[in-house]
């Protein structure tokens, strides 16, 4: 990250146009409502969020070179005169310096950007948590071409709302500490009705795009409850396959069958394994899902949803993998039985005379 960009580049209209066109295109793709188009819109929105964060971090770096120099000077002073005042001044400079390692992290890491802006009071903690969870979904779509088709429309809408909110505070968060805002001051009578360009763009993006949030929230809640209940049902199915395995053991088996296979329920009971969850956790997660408040603030609802989903999602993956393995074993047994039947028919003594 260059902490001292050219001022014309810092407030470049071309850079802002790139962002505006990107968001306008994302909205156009969202209106199609197809999962494939929503995936592209989502990736564009996620990138826009990171670009806005990147530009919001710039003002925080401009004095970094100065404080690095100041820290070096106080280090030299402390070596010569290790007084309490010198140590205090050095500590003050140290707290203001952003180390090179942190700068590299801010340059490449989405999560680090969000956390940094929260620490600098430029972003609300709830807003940052929602952005970070949405970015995890983006990684699935971008790196693995995986689309959560049943919820991608709601997630894209949430990302759209967050980015529009970021635009509304864009002029404040990207403001140069010395040069001032990108738009010069108007006469007082015009300032009363003046709206920052980024806010105008946010308003225009929202025009004609209205989502029934309560309906969307209900869909997320209903879908999450269904997924948790499916894991619980999966544990019950495992008990039907293995007579001596209860649901608690089934949950353990889902976590161990691949990494630490066992030969019997008794061996599984004695197995020392770093279990991440137990059967009781499924009931706890289901109870939390049922408590999701459809009337709560969008970001608060989504963060509750995202936190719960992150907690339980591994159990869903584990149970799905176990059931696939059981199905593979069942199919293998059927195939072996069919092969045995073919061999038996082949070896069965023939009756009657040979054909003439």
Image (tube, helix red, strand yellow):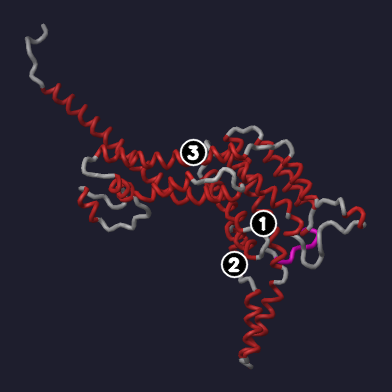
Q: Which residue is mark 3?
A: 223
> Looking at the image, which residue is at 70% across and 63% down?
58
* CA distance separating discs 2 and 1: 15 Å
| Mark 3 or mark 1, earlier in chain | 1
> Looking at the image, which residue is at 76% across and 46% down?
201
> Looking at the image, which residue is at 21% across and 31% down?
336
Q: Which residue is mark 1?
A: 53
Q: Which residues are magenta?
A: 3-9
Residue 140 visible? The answer is yes
- Judging depth in this view, the residue of 284 and 129 nearest the camera is 284
Q: Quadrant of residue 171?
A: bottom right
Callout 1 secondary element:
helix
Q: Quadrant of residue 151?
A: top right
Mark 1 neighbour density, 10 Å: few (under 14) some (14–19) many (20 or more): many
Question: Residue 188, image x and y in percent?
Answer: 91, 57
Residue 153 visible? The answer is no
Establish if 255 lies above or below 173: above
- Judging depth in this view, the residue of 174 and 312 nearest the camera is 312
Q: Which residue is mark 2?
A: 102
Residue 5 in the magenta stretch? The answer is yes
Q: Is residue 344 left or right of residue 272?
A: left
Frontmost of labels 3 and 1 is 3
Q: Is residue 207 left or right of residue 107?
A: right
Question: Residue 13, image x and y in percent?
Answer: 80, 52
Callout 3 secondary element:
helix
* CA distance separating discs 3 and 2: 39 Å
- Judging depth in this view, the residue of 288 and 260 nearest the camera is 288
């Amino acid at each position: 990250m260059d902490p001292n960009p050219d001022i014309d580049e810092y407030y470049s209209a071309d850079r802002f146009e790139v962002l505006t066109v990107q968001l306008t295109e994302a909205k156009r793709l969202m209106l199609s409502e197809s999962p494939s188009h929503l995936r592209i819109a989502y990736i564009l929105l996620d990138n826009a969020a990171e670009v806005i964060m990147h530009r919001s971090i710039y003002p925080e770096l401009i004095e970094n070179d100065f404080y690095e120099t100041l820290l070096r000077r106080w280090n030299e002073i402390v070596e010569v005169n290790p007084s309490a005042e010198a140590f205090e001044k050095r500590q003050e400079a140290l707290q203001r310096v952003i180390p090179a390692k942190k700068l590299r992290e801010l340059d490449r890491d989405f999560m680090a950007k969000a956390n940094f802006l929260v620490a600098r009071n430029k972003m609300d903690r709830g807003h940052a948590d929602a952005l970070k969870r949405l970015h995890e979904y983006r990684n699935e779509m971008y790196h693995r071409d995986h689309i959560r088709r049943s919820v991608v429309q709601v997630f894209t809408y949430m990302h759209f709302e967050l980015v529009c909110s970021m635009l509304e505070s864009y002029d404040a968060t990207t403001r140069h500490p010395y040069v001032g805002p990108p738009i010069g001051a108007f006469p007082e009578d015009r300032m009363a009705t003046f709206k920052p360009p980024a806010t105008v763009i946010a308003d225009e993006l929202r025009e004609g795009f209205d989502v029934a949030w309560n309906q969307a929230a209900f869909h997320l809640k209903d879908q999450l409850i269904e997924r948790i209940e499916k894991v619980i049902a999966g544990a019950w199915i495992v008990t039907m396959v293995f007579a001596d395995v209860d649901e608690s053991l089934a949950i353990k088996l889902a976590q161990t069958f691949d990494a630490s296979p066992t030969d019997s329920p008794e061996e599984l009971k004695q197995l020392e394994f770093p279990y991440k969850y137990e059967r009781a956790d499924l009931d706890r997660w289901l109870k939390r899902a049922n408590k999701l408040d459809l009337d709560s603030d969008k970001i608060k609802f989504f963060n509750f949803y995202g936190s719960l989903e992150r907690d339980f999602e591994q159990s869903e993956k584990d149970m799905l993998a176990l059931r696939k393995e059981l199905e593979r074993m069942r199919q293998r047994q059927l195939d072996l039985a069919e092969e045995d039947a073919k061999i038996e028919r082949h070896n069965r003594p023939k009756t009657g005379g040979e054909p003439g």
